[in-house]
Image (tube, rainbow, N blue to C red):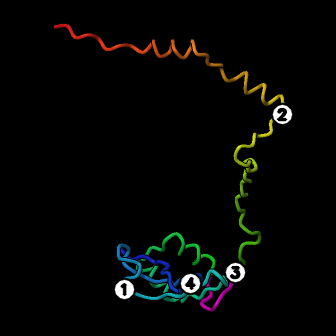
Amino acid sequence: MLAIKLKLIGKKGQHSFRMIVQEKRTKLQGEAVDDLGWFNPHSNQMKLNQEKLKYWIGNGAQPTENAQKIIAKAGDDSEVRSFESRKSPKRRKKDKKDITPPAVPVGAEMPQSAETAEKISEQVPEVTEEKSSEAVNDVPKEKEKVE
């Protein structure tokens, strides 16, 4: 089954595409059956040979999704054609601000308000020597082996 695909050409940062007719399952950089035109996404220009395009679609070639979008934008002209690009820029994610506290020199105490210190002391239970020794004694001893 034949497919109408976009083949990536050009160097890094300056990509453009060739619209080609190729067997659906072959590698994109493999041999193409026919070349239908080109598309430059940076300048939003394209040129498609409409006669060849109609011939291959009539013979059963199926365009891919992206090729179908470009064919729709090209219209019925076989001349170099430009189309309007995106009017508003893409939205970018906002950078998260660093919430890390300022650096404190070694040996210095962190400044805390009296309310914060009270909340922390209420949340942390105090450990006394009696409680710590009871915790050690609570560890189960191994069962003696009965012979």
Residue 113 - label: 2
Give the number of the mark in front: 4 or 2.
Answer: 2
The residue that label 1 is drawn on is 31
Query: Which circle's residue, 1 or 2, is located before the other in the chain?
Result: 1
Give the number of the mark in front: 4 or 3.
Answer: 4
Query: Which circle's residue, 4 or 2, is located before the other in the chain?
Result: 4
Seen as rendered, the residue at the extreme top is 146
Up/down of 106 relative to 145, above or below: below
Q: Quadrant location of residue 88?
A: bottom right
In front of the other: 115 or 15: 115
**What is the span of residues highlighted in magenta in the rendered image?**
75-82
Query: Which circle's residue, 4 or 3, is located before the other in the chain?
Result: 4
Give the number of the mark in front: 3 or 1.
Answer: 1
Q: Is mark 3 on a helix, strand or loop?
A: loop
* Direction from residue 128 to residue 20 in the image, left or right: left
Q: How crowded is mark 3: few (under 14 residues within 10 Å), some or many (20 or more)?
A: few
